[in-house]
Amino acid sequence: MPISRRRSYEQGHRPKFLVFVDDTPECARAVRFAARRVARLGAKLVMLAVSAPPESFEWLGVGDVMRAEAEDAANEQLDKAAERAREAAGVEPERVVRVGKKQDEILKLVEEDEDIAFLVLAAGTSSEGPGPLVTSFAGIAASTFPLPVVIVPGSLSDEEIDALAG
């Protein structure tokens, strides 16, 4: 997907920030940063939550139930994140729930929505590193990803995020 085809780069266009939402404590940092930047720039905020597909329980007839439960959990994460965005900057986000692999669903959404200009990810603070999603987008995928990836350290305070985001 060539950068030149993205509408988010057109003069006068209102870009979207895509923030990946999950149940990690660091996610709140990324949501706050994205909401503050969106409010400052007059941009739009898109929040994506991805639930894992049910394992092969279809033969037991519980696959649909498991999928619905996973989507409910993703919607609960989005509810909390949307409240954080409203509190941080008065921003009302667009919400997207997908079922699949996280990286694949991010890529699909970016491909589908040419208005998305930035991907915002939270970096974990555990001893295991920043997290597999951040590692994949900051690693080899960074050279081919069609838009900037903003990685927000999970250890930043509200004051630090507010100062950085404007």
Image: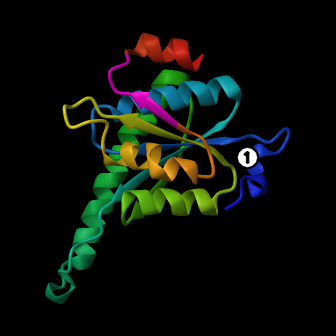
Residue at the (45%, 47%) spot, across then down: 137
Which stretch did the figure color magenta?
150-156
Instruction: State the SS at label 1.
Output: helix
The spot of residue 8 in percent (x, y) is 73, 46
Query: In which quadrant will I find the N terminus?
Result: bottom right
Residue at the (25%, 63%) spot, across then down: 69
**Vertically, is 123 above or below 65?**
above
Q: Residues within 10 Å of mark 1 (few under 14, many from 20)?
A: many
Residue type at mark 1? Answer: Ser
Name the residue at the right extreme: 11
The spot of residue 112 in percent (x, y) is 62, 63
On the picture, is 44 further left or further right than 35? right
The quarter holding residue 153 reads top left
On the picture, is 151 further left or further right than 128? right
Query: In which quadrant will I find the C terminus?
Result: top right
Front-lying residue, 164 or 128: 128
Q: How is the image coloured?
A: rainbow
Front-lying residue, 83 or 34: 34
Q: How many marks?
A: 1
Tag 1 residue: 8
Residue at the (24%, 72%) spot, across then down: 54
